[in-house]
Amino acid sequence: MGLPQSFEFGAVSAALLALWMVGITDFRASVTLFGIQSFVLGLVAIAIGARHGEPLLILVGVAVIVLKGLIVPYYLIYAGRRIGCRRDSLMPVSAPTQFFIALSLLSLVLLLRPLHAELPTSTLPAVGILILGMMLMITRRLAVSQIVGFLVLENGIFLYTIGQSHSMPIVVEIGVLMDVLSCVMLAGLLAFKINKTFEHIDVAELTELIG
Amino acid sequence: MTLLAVLIPCPLLICILALAGRRRGVLPRLAAVAMGIHALIVAYFWLPRLHDSAIRVQELPVHGLNADTTGTFFVLVITLVALASFTHATGFFARESQVKRPPADRHISQFYFFAALFVLAMYVVVLADNLGYMWIGMEATTLLSAPLVYFHRSRHSLEATWKYLIICSVGIAFGFFGTALIYTASQHSGVLGDGSLSVLALTAHAHQLPAGLVRMSYVFLLLGYGTKAGLFPLHNWLPDAHSEAPAPASALLSGSLLNCALVAIWRVSGLAQAAGQGALVRVTLLPMAVITVVFASLCLIKQRDIKRLLAYSSMENVGIMAAAISLGSWPGFALQALNHSVCKTAVFLLAGNLLQRFKTKDIGEIKGLLNIQPGHTMLLLLGLAAVAGTPPFGSFLAEWQILSSAADQHRLWLVLILAAALAVAFIALALQAGSIAFGKHDASGKSIETADASASLILVPGVLMIVSLCLGIAFPMKALALIEGVLR
């Protein structure tokens, strides 16, 4: 496959993985899917870097595979096991309905295609992943699942940045990656604390501060 | 070279001290001294730059940072707030260790470690010319200040920290999407080569950027940095985080972090205006700003928690500053930022003192303070008056400046709404202050320990109030001329 095909293949499979995550409630399964998605995006970055002769982008791809594809999923599954959460229940909208809402939102993006001429080809799958990540964050009530939603959203933005005709400056890419990782580590620690203090990690029940 | 180098050593020293020192009581004093030296050095190297109106741009040795005049101004403001907060913290932590369940020494060390790094991250945000660095700095401020909010390790602080971390991170993620979009726009310009994130370069070639991409990117950037500034629909985390953090951290969050977010909004708004999208700035940022002011003023009326009261008052001030930004009134924005930082830091520190003394944040239980602690009460009353924009304090001058620039642009409805909201806020704050100062204290309630305050607890807010007064009386014209020279 040439670069355009393999790029589109990677981008679209990442979007489909995100869509799959919307439809399932099992925590471990969604973390695993996130890991696969990061892996795919890392490969896409490496492919683009090799094609355009940008060794730094290859480095970013490797970093994404190692950090977001392996370490973060491992950490989240470990956290989930320690806390003892298996699946998201009590969602405001049931998973199948969410799946349909997600599909209609994606079709809407596909139909409207804002600023089609100026944006790179990666925009549609990237915006799709962004929307799906946002949906995951809104509908999931477990603290750890919200972290996964945030990571998916961030993956969407990452796909957008690597799909531009010139990738972002390396310092920025690496800095963003580091920030996101620290954020996930911190949020994971807080999820432990929430579990210990409140004896649940249902963030919708965190309502003591009002007014 | 020196400009950048002088910012780093002292905060870094505090980090090292925090990692090394475990002994109770020594660390806060050392940190305060270090911060004092830091403030002197920064003032020596950076203050003269304010007078030199020739300096518009100065490349720093690190590519992508730029000590322009705005950056210089806000570096000084951040340093002032940090100095006040760290000095006050010596007394604050000394007193904190006398309560029934004192915080562990470990937690105090952590506080200093993260607070010092937090100050450095704020310097990065205000000095960044590269939008990517600005984003990284901004997200770093969230990550480094979250442990400060969690200082008390209580249920409430945990809830506040979670909301703060998640809402701000998601908001900022959208900001990064906006940054990536502007990068795409720069690749289409045809003159910026492989693309650029430098605000200077982008502004210089603003007219070659495709309008559609600039508009879309501005909306996302506003969404991102607006979350961090606490603009209306994105403000949920602000009252929680600012009220649950310990007083020195609240002062840093309210007095300097909000400014950083507003500087980011100012830079991207300036870019959008240069690209001929001034109308977009006015239809997005201005309504958000006005609704923020109105909403926060209404929230002040019924508020029973003294620190949440101050947090909503910060939101109100953020709204006013955002209005100034969307009107393009740079003197108004800078003056208001300076004055708000000075007096809000003072009142947050005073509220921390009250909280330690009365063990409650409920305004209903803090009553008749004038008889118990006259010095504190007078300062608190003056501080609240300054926050509400009463003459003769500097904040009055700033708000006047903003309202008059709105009137100059024939936006009478804006003047009317802002003036009405400011009046509501003033009345609400006056009523609350009256209840705190003159209400009848319920002596049968909790026993109130005698004051054993160390000097810094009252001295720091006192000095800040004098500064605020000076900004209003002693050299208002000089301050105005200086800032106009600086920011034009």
Image (cartoon, rainbow, N blue to C red):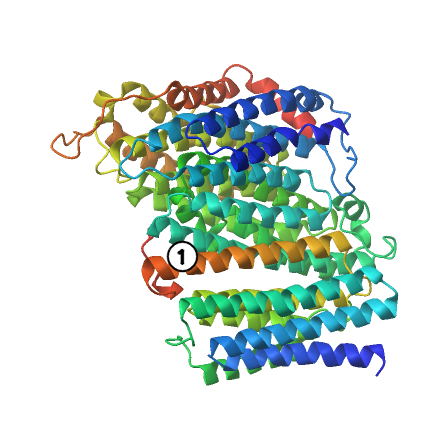
At horizontal 77% and vertical 67% (from top left) the residue drawn is A118
- The location of residue B435, given as percent across then percent down, is 24, 32
Q: Secondary structure at mark 1?
A: helix
Instruction: Give residue B158's position: percent from left, percent from top.
Output: 39, 52
User: Which residue is the extreme one toward the top?
Assistant: B474
Mark 1 Cα-neighbour bin, 10 Å: few <14, some 14–19, many ≥20: some
Q: Which image quarter: residue B19?
A: top right
Amino acid at dot 1? Lys
Rendering quarter of residue B177: bottom right
Name the spot of residue A160 as percent of width and height, x first: 71, 67
Number of marks: 1
Instruction: Tell which of A205 and A122 is nearer to you.
Output: A205
Q: Is residue B415 visible?
A: no
Q: Circle 1 is placed at which residue position?
A: A193
Viewer-side residue, B464 vs B34: B34
**Residue B296 place in picture, x, y as percent:** 41, 45
The quarter in which the N terminus of chain A is drawn is bottom right
**Subunit of label 1:** A
Question: Residue, x 38% and y 43% (percent of image)?
Answer: B243
Q: Residue at x 53, y 35 (%)?
A: B20
Q: Work out whether residue B285 can be spotted.
A: yes
